[in-house]
Amino acid sequence: MLRWIQQDRADILQYVGVLPAPIRGEMYDLWISPKTGEELERCPFFRRGKCAIHDTKPDVCRKYPHGKPCLREMAKEGNR
Ligand code: SF4
């Protein structure tokens, strides 16, 4: 989250929820609706089959193979 603050990425930060108490070392929650405050079912940055914020995506997403489409969101599409 600090990276997004330093990068002035309000477009990303609007979807980040700050947790009142750290859970497993994390202090924020992804991805939260800026309108309702509820967790979104789908990542708002999965667009046209790709990650729209690949260069600065969350650490948890960096575990996916480099250069590959977002497997997490593609799996959800397959389950629809
Ligand atoms: S890798 Fe997938 S889940 Fe992560 S930010 Fe990109 S589109 Fe969203």
Image (tube, rainbow, N blue to C red):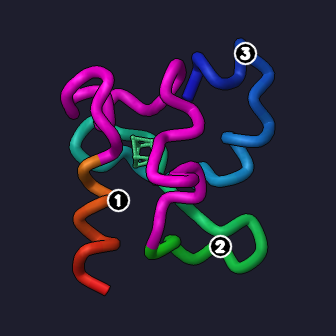
Q: Which mark is nearer the camera, 2 or 3?
A: 3
- Using a 10 Å C-alpha cutoff, classify the residue at mark 1 as few (fewer than 14 neighbours), some (14 to 19) or many (20 or more): some
The residue wearing badge 1 is 73
In the image, taking residue 17 as reference, residue 75 lies left or right, namely left
Tag 3's secondary structure? loop
Q: Residue 22 appears at what percent x and percent y?
A: 37, 45
**What range of the chain is rendered magenta?**
42-70
Q: Residue at x 32, y 23 (%)?
A: 67
Q: Residue at x 65, y 73 (%)?
A: 37
Q: CA gap, disc 2 to disc 1?
A: 21 Å
Label 3 CB sits under 8 Å from any ligand 1 atom: no
The earlier-in-sequence mark between 2 and 3 is 3
Amino acid marked by disc 1 = Glu
Amino acid marked by disc 3 = Gln
The residue wearing badge 3 is 7
Tag 1's secondary structure? helix
Label 2 CB sits under 8 Å from any ligand 1 atom: no
36 in relation to 29, above or below: below
Task: Name, please, the residue furthest toward the front.
Answer: 48
The residue wearing badge 2 is 37
Q: Dividing the image into 4 quarters, which one contains the C terminus?
A: bottom left
Q: Are marks 1 and 3 in contact (CB under 8 Å)?
A: no
Q: Residue 30 appears at what percent x and percent y?
A: 47, 53
Q: Which mark is nearer the camera, 1 or 3?
A: 1
Amino acid marked by disc 2 = Gly
Label 1 CB sits under 8 Å from any ligand 1 atom: yes
The earlier-in-sequence mark between 2 and 1 is 2
